[in-house]
């Protein structure tokens, strides 16, 4: 039954209605789950709390919308395998999700015309039929790959992060940069990136608290950002590049590193806040008129937002005539790249970005 996902065909009008009425749909599912007498559902909602539960429903809705809009249904499979893995690790019986899918179907049917609702609800039929597949795949925990040459150093850095060793972490980075020819970008690729993944995975699997996850990520952000700043300066005479995350991203260290990397190749980079709205981002691009815009998504639920921003920028060439590069973990969570129409280039890593920059210059 798993291949059934590729048969999804949701018309643009059904998708638009789904987007317009998403608040009501989510709110109804929230209320239905909270009033449900099923013991598995009650245990699930009680364990995670109403705030996290409501946020998870919003993320779920955004992910469904992104998957339909980009026609990349692997986003669905990856997300639900991840979700089952996370909540199983928190000792929640994921069979409660079968009840949740039923409430989504009911709410969609209540808020959309039957013909439009049926198109959306095929997705929930797919989720129900693949419930056992998700459980099986969720049990196969993925290991974080670290170059064997740096495995010991990785362990030391992780220990410092988890034990509030700010000075020790900073000293470790300083002492070991020479192993990477003092190239902070190479150090970031080989150690900081897998460290971030590891910390995120440990939080997802309930191995560390939210507070410890926040401390670790903010510590990495602070120290790596300081080390990068030491080596670069802005030159306003160079061609302007604008960088930003899109949507409700929680971390922006990755895009900061990308910005400094672009600076090192002779561009003037302006990094916008990760909390900027779509309208503010687009207006800033129109006002600043950069030669290049680099947009990043870490969360797959923000892929739809990225698509909408790129489409608007490319539809009005009188206001923006530059190039658009996209990237971020949210586009590469599966073997297939999530296709974003009208983007000029999709970069997997700094090496690919470097090749693009050389051609651009």
Image: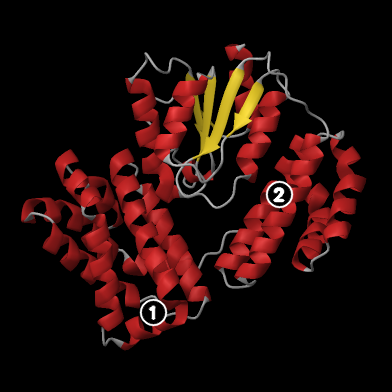
- Closer-to-camera residue (278/197): 278
Instruction: Point out residue 111 in the picture as x, y percentages from the top left corner.
Output: 14, 59
Q: Quadrant of the N terminus?
A: bottom left
The reply, left or right, for residue 184 in relation to residue 27 is right
Q: In the rendered image, which residue does mark 2 sit on? A: 221
Q: Is residue 347 above or below residue 304?
A: above
Q: Residue furthest left?
A: 114
Location of residue 2 by image quarter? bottom left
Task: Report crowding for label 2: few under 14, some 14 to 19, many 20 or more residues within 10 A (C-alpha).
Answer: some
The reply, left or right, for residue 354 in relation to residue 159 is left
Location of residue 189 by image quarter? top right
Q: What coloring was used for the rendering?
A: secondary structure
- Residue at the image point whose x is 46% and y is 61% from the top: 82
Task: Report crowding for label 1: few under 14, some 14 to 19, many 20 or more residues within 10 A (C-alpha).
Answer: many
- Residue at the image point whose x is 18% and y is 65% from the top: 107
Instruction: Point out residue 306 in the picture as x, y percentages from the top left corner.
Output: 41, 37
User: Is there CB contact under 8 Å for labels 2 and 1?
Assistant: no
Q: Is residue 14 above or below residue 88?
A: above
Q: Quadrant of the C terminus?
A: top right
Answer yes or no: is residue 45 visible. yes
Q: Is residue 185 above or below residue 109?
A: above
- Of labels 2 and 1, earlier in sequence is 1
Mark 1 lies on a secondary structure that is helix
Q: CA distance from mark 2 to mark 1?
A: 33 Å
Instruction: Point out residue 351 in the picture as x, y percentages from the top left corner.
Output: 65, 28
Q: Which mark is residue 45?
A: 1
Instruction: Point out residue 305 in the picture as x, y percentages from the top left corner.
Output: 38, 41
Mark 2 lies on a secondary structure that is helix
- Closer-to-camera residue (200/214): 214
């Amino acid at each position: 039954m798993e291949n059934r996902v590729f048969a999804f065909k949701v018309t643009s009008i059904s998708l638009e209605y789904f987007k317009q009425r998403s608040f009501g749909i989510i709110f109804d599912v929230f209320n239905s789950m909270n009033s449900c007498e099923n013991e598995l559902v009650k245990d699930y909602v009680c364990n995670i709390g109403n705030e996290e539960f409501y946020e998870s429903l919003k993320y779920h809705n955004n992910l469904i919308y992104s998957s339909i809009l980009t026609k990349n249904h692997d986003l669905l499979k990856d997300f639900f395998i991840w979700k089952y893995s996370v909540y199983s690790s928190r000792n929640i019986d994921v069979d409660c999700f079968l009840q949740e899918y039923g409430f989504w179907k009911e709410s969609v049917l209540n808020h959309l015309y039957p013909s439009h609702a049926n198109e959306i609800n095929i997705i929930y039929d797919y989720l129900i039929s693949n419930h056992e597949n998700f459980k099986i795949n969720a049990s196969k925990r993925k290991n974080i790959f670290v170059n064997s040459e740096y495995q010991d150093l990785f362990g030391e850095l992780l220990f410092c992060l988890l034990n509030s060793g700010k000075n020790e972490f900073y000293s470790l980075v300083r002492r070991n940069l020479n192993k990477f020819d003092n190239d902070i970008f190479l150090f970031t690729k080989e150690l900081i990136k897998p460290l971030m993944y590891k910390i995120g995975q440990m939080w997802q699997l309930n191995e560390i608290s939210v507070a410890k996850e926040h401390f670790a990520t903010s510590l990495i952000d602070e120290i790596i950002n300081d080390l990068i700043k030491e080596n670069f300066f802005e030159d306003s005479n160079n061609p302007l590049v604008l960088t930003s995350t899109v949507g409700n991203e929680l971390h922006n260290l990755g895009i900061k590193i990308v910005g400094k990397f672009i600076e090192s190749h002779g561009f003037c980079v302006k990094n916008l806040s990760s909390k900027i709205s779509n309208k503010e981002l687009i207006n800033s691009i129109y006002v600043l008129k950069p030669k290049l815009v680099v947009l990043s998504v870490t969360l797959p639920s923000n892929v739809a937002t990225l698509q909408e921003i790129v489409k608007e920028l490319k539809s009005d060439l009188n206001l923006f005539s530059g190039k658009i590069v996209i990237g971020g973990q949210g586009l590469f969570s599966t073997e297939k790249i999530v296709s974003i129409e009208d983007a000029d280039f999709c970069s997997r890593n700094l090496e690919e970005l470097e090749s693009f920059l050389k051609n651009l210059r």
